[in-house]
Image (tube, rainbow, N blue to C red):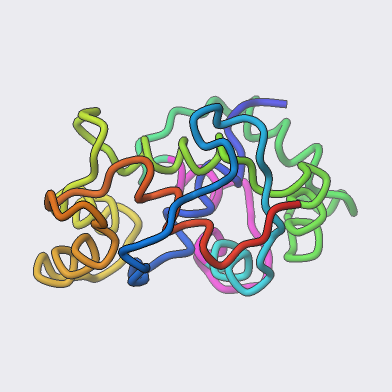
């Protein structure tokens, strides 16, 4: 299946306002490898992700809704890649992905991998400098249709910025995103 997946977008979409995280503590699941750790799915967060894809709020995701969200995130996806994703996810073959099918795909994927979180980080790190600024948070949330002031984005970054440098680095991002998850 294509590397374009729902998991690539999970974290950027489920954390409308980035939660405050403890200034202490660290991510303990071999974050340097990025491949060995997976986390259980949080149904409430997954519902928020699903709802973001479901733009017309009809309880199902169409291929057009999926493509629109990819476009907003400036992800390239050919029609055949979207068709492949729907071929795998659309279990009842009605042309749409409902929430049950959405969750089934996520569960079959084995949960959320550390690499998925790293991909989400890279999505927010618009200039590729290895850290996320308040400006980057503001721009990405805007692309996703979220309303958030620059001041709110600064507050979000400060709530996650454990080392006080004014940015979110990879370790801080992973810690923030996994604090409410349990390893599988």
**Apparent side of residue 61 relative to residue 16 in the rendered image (left or right):** right
Q: Position of residue 59 (x, y in %)?
A: 67, 71
Find out whether residue 56 is within the magenta segment: yes
Give the answer, above or below, for where 122 lies relative to 91. above
Residue 57: x %, y % from top left: 56, 73
Query: Which percent across, then down, holds residue 124?
Result: 31, 44
Taking the spot 60% from the left edge, 46% from the top edge, the residue there is 6
What residue appears at the point 69 percent right and 60 percent down from the top-left corner?
A: 41
Number of numbered labels in the structure image:
0
Quadrant into which the N terminus falls: top right
x and y, in percent, of residue 142 in the image: 25, 58
Q: Is residue 67 magenta?
A: yes
Outermost residue on the right side: it is 92
Report the magenta residues as a range. 52-70
Task: Please give the name of the residue rendered at 48% of the width and 54% of the height, measured from the top-left corner.
Answer: 11
The foreground one among 63 and 152 is 152
Asked which quadrant contains residue 48, the reply is bottom right
Q: Is residue 170 left or right of residue 13?
A: left
Q: Is residue 179 above or below residue 62?
A: below
The answer to which quarter of the image holds residue 125 is top left
Residue 108, compared with residue 158, is above or below; it is: above
Query: Which residue is at 50% across, 43% downward?
Result: 117
Task: Name the image quarter holding residue 80.
Answer: top right
In the image, is residue 120 above or below residue 161? above
């Amino acid at each position: 299946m294509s590397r374009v997946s729902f998991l690539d977008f999970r974290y950027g979409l489920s954390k409308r306002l980035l939660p405050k995280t403890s200034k202490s503590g660290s991510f303990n699941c071999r974050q340097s490898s990025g491949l060995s750790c997976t986390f259980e799915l949080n149904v409430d967060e997954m519902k928020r992700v699903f709802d973001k894809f479901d733009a017309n709020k009809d309880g199902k995701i169409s291929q057009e809704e999926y493509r629109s969200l990819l476009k907003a995130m400036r992800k390239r996806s050919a029609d055949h890649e979207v068709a492949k994703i729907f071929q795998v996810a659309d279990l009842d073959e009605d042309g749409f992905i409902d929430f049950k099918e959405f969750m089934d795909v996520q569960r079959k994927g084995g949960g959320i991998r550390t690499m998925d979180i790293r991909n989400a980080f890279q999505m927010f790190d618009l200039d590729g400098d290895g850290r996320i600024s308040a400006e980057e948070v503001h721009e990405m949330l805007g692309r996703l249709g979220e309303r958030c002031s620059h001041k709110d984005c600064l507050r979000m970054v400060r709530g996650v910025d454990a080392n006080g440098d004014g940015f979110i680095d990879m370790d801080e991002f992973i810690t923030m995103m996994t604090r409410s998850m349990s390893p599988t």
